[in-house]
């Protein structure tokens, strides 16, 4: 009891210093021209108000236009309706944008088809920022990894996405492991997702997260979700029942000076998951026959599944994103509430 109390006291006394360090870090980055933070996002962070980061790859490459714009706008609407400030993150014209205006979201949504957006993971950030203007793509669509990195630099603690990357099948041979996992192991941001895409090796992904001390939480479930399907056959290490549970775990990790992020895995409750899962297995075989690998696998799988399911997979994907946004908003509110106590 006393040790828990001491831990909480340490957490409270360290908060002002932690916030000051975040502000200083953000200020330094901003002055170097790295971050361009939208006014409402910056004000919310400075005041300790809830903010949720959203990635841009899901907009540029995850859905076709105009469905991608509809999903992006609905995600931001859900957050605002709950009193949370949305911060869609992307790289535009050589600067890292933390929060986008409506017209920018629309331009980003059209960029995938126009091929004016480059998929941008953490390793790509210095490249897309450093190359000269004539060779620079208009948009850098941030992945889970790079969105985490930039969200943390901006002082944002909660990030919502659809699903994260992981260890690829045969990854123990090919060493094909998503940078999302590496970023989770070193960047203290709460990532809310529908688990791990079922095209990946979920068991080995969970082993990676355990080895790197990433708290992995099942949202009201004991079984780790597999993106479209709530079932993977893999047990979740821990279970949480509420946003307050997540917030308390987050702040406990901060008081312990843990540098890792946290993964909150939310089961997709859409009923078409089983049908989509069957088509995914077909798509995996097709991708192997065509020698598709690396970053090209996921877009191929998603397009194949969308065609074979008549768009049901896209609808299910959109539904799980909105569900994650709702839960992520509650988590951001709870984290801010504890911070401001």
Image (cartoon, rainbow, N blue to C red):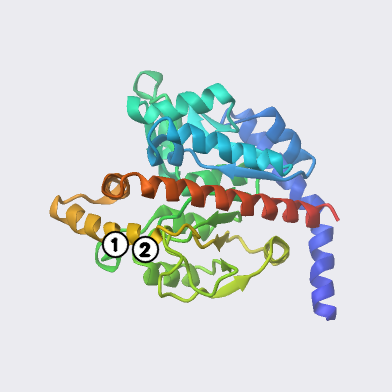
Left or right of 66? Residue 326 is right
Viewer-proximal residue among 176 and 275 = 275
Q: Indicate whether 297 appears above or below 125.
A: below
- Neighbor class of circle 2 (other Cα within 10 Å; few <14, some 14-19, many 20+) is some
**Disc 1 marks which residue?**
278
Task: Name which residue lies at 58% across and 29% down.
Answer: 100
Viewer-proximal residue among 50 and 175 = 50
Count the marks: how many?
2
**How far is disc 1 from disc 2 in space, using C-alphas?**
6 Å
Residues at discs 1 and 2 in contact (Cβ within 8 Å): yes
**Disc 2 marks which residue?**
274
SS category of the residue bearing label 1: helix
Task: Name which residue lies at 44% across and 59% down.
Answer: 271
Confirm whether residue 218 shows in the render.
yes
| Residue 283, percent from left and from top | 24, 55
Q: Where's the C terminus, which quadrant?
A: bottom right
């Amino acid at each position: 009891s006393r040790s828990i109390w001491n831990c909480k006291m340490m957490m409270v006394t360290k908060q002002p210093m932690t916030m000051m360090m975040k502000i200083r870090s953000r200020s330094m980055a901003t002055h170097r021209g790295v971050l361009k933070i939208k006014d409402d996002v910056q004000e919310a962070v400075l005041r300790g108000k809830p903010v949720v980061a959203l990635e841009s790859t899901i907009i540029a490459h995850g859905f076709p236009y105009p469905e991608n714009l509809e999903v992006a706008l609905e995600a931001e609407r859900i957050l605002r309706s709950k009193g949370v400030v949305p911060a869609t993150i992307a790289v535009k014209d050589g600067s890292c944008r933390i929060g986008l205006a409506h017209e920018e979201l629309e331009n980003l949504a059209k960029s995938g088809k126009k091929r004016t957006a480059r998929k941008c993971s953490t390793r790509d950030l210095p490249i897309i920022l450093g190359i000269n203007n004539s060779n620079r793509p208009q948009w850098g669509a941030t992945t889970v990894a790079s969105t985490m990195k930039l969200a943390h630099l901006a002082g944002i603690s909660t990030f919502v996405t659809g699903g994260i990357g992981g260890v690829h099948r045969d990854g123990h041979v090919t060493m094909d492991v998503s940078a999302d996992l590496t970023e989770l192991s070193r960047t203290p941001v709460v990532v809310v997702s529908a688990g791990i895409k079922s095209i990946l090796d979920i068991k080995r992904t969970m082993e990676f997260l355990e080895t790197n001390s990433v708290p992995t939480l099942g949202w009201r479930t004991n079984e780790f979700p597999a993106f479209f399907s709530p079932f993977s056959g893999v047990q979740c290490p821990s279970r949480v029942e509420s946003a307050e549970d997540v917030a308390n775990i987050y702040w406990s990790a901060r008081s312990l000076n843990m540098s890792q992020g946290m993964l909150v895995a939310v089961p997709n409750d859409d009923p078409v998951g089983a049908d989509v899962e069957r088509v995914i297995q077909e798509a995996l075989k097709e991708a192997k026959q065509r020698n598709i690998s690396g970053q090209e696998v996921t877009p191929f799988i998603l397009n194949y599944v969308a065609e074979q399911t008549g768009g049901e997979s896209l609808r299910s994907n959109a539904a799980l994103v909105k569900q994650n946004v709702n839960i992520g908003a509650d988590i951001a509110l709870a984290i801010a509430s504890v911070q401001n106590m």
